[in-house]
Image (cartoon, rainbow, N blue to C red):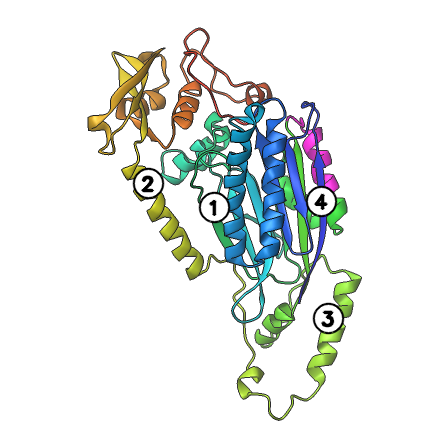
Amino acid sequence: MTALRTGAVTDVGRVRTNNEDQMLVTESLFAVADGMGGHAAGEVAALVAVDTLRDEFAGNPTADGLVDATRTANTNVIARAEADVATRGMGTTVCAAALVPNEDGHDTLVIVNVGDSRAYLLRDGELSQITEDHSVADELMRAGQLTEEQAAVDRRRHVLTRVLGDGDMVSPDRFDLDPFRGDRILLATDGLTNEVPDGEIASILRRIEDPGEAARELVRVAKNNGGADNITVILIDVIDDEGKAEEASEALANEPPRPRGLITAAERDSKLRDLDAESRPASANRPSSFDEPTRPRRKLKITIFGLAVLAVIAGAVGAVLFLGRPWYVSADHGRVALFRGHGDGLLKEKLVDRTDIRLRSLDGIAQERVSEGVRFNSRKDAEAYIARLPTTTTSTSTTTSSLLVPTTVAGTATTTVTPTTKK
Ligand code: MN
């Protein structure tokens, strides 16, 4: 059995009056959700999401069960929004991790996400981001249109391309991870990651051994740096890994095991127990293959299966996008305009709405992009993109306040523009 130790904190932050984040911590399932939508609807969306995850995963505690639970959470958020006018249009991110048995009877950590709540892994002192954000800026970065540095300050990083509650079909990303003793997994909403740079997160995670204390310190620093949003942090420490880390270091012949840090008394005890168990003679009828030292893969990996799942999902999404009728933001009579496609690309689009925003008033890159036409899955996304278009007459630098209030170009945005920017 893989043993975990966790710490979790959710905090309203220093600016908001209510906390629309939710978190879920059970023995083997962990999740953060960042709700959005006015009049506390975000709270409802996030709560429906984590409640659904917990209930559905309990009925099928497997990797597929977690992916299915995420899809059901999407359905339930939509159903709830339809049943209650006050919550119409609500949505939520979700980032969940579950410990599930794999085919070899070992444990795998499965991570799924929709939106921009993130999972990180601290392993051997190094922090890496496991998930990818589903935001316009990050998608543009992955498409090579923005550099990492540009994406990090682009205001479209707050415009989400995938959330729960925004369409019948949601495709969560899935990542599978072999848990090793000493691994530390962080789940966090953007209230943490917008305020605290990765380097500072890493240093806190390396410095503070107790997961509860480390979680509290992350939240304290986020609030100290502004606390503009709700902050939710879950830390999951792998304190026993079925002896895998041990096997791995033994397989490294004469190489002494590297100091791993974060060793607790419980870990030391379990290590001594493991050594004791291994000093016993192997039983005679034990298959010889068991005696061959195995060297587990130590790197974070997306399994072939995971890739296949993603490929199928990507294919399905592609088919839906192609068969469905996409939305485009392009230009008409020198103004930014919204078009509805007919499945055959820009050639057959229909003008839906022309804004007052002059194409010429946009900054260079935006002007170019809009001239070419930018494609969207939904009208909401397209309108959010329009609301966020950087002009040469407004500053494009990001300040804390611009994260809170959707910025529109004074007097030029049309009333049909309804940004989906997270509140
Ligand atoms: Mn948030």
Amino acid carrying label 3: it is: Lys
* Disc 3 from disc 2: Cα separation: 51 Å
Amino acid carrying label 2: it is: Val
CB atoms of marks 4 and 1 within 8 Å: no
Secondary structure found at label 3: helix
Image location (x, y in percent) of residue 200: 64, 40
Quadrant location of the C terminus in the rendered image? top right
* Disc 2 from disc 1: Cα separation: 16 Å
Q: Residue furthest top?
A: 411
Q: Residue furthest bottom?
A: 284
Q: Judge depth for marks 1 and 3 and give the one in front.
A: 1
In the image, which disc is placed on residue 271? 3
Foreground residue among 122 and 91: 91
Q: Judge depth for marks 3 and 4 and give the one in front.
A: 4
Amino acid carrying label 4: it is: Ala
- Return the disc, 4 or 1, that comes first in the chain's sequence: 4
Asked whether residue 218 is drawn in magenta, I would say yes
Q: Judge depth for marks 4 and 2 and give the one in front.
A: 2
Q: Residue at the spot x=42%, y=25% of the render? A: 380
Secondary structure found at label 4: strand
- Asked if residue 120 shows in the view, the reply is no
Q: Quadrant of residue 240?
A: bottom right
Q: Residue at the spot x=56%, y=44% of the render? A: 95
| Residue that numbered label 2 is attached to | 320
| Residue that numbered label 1 is attached to | 172
Image location (x, y in percent) of residue 345: 24, 32
In the image, which disc is placed on residue 281? none
* Disc 4 from disc 1: Cα separation: 23 Å
- Start-end of magenta stretch: 214-228
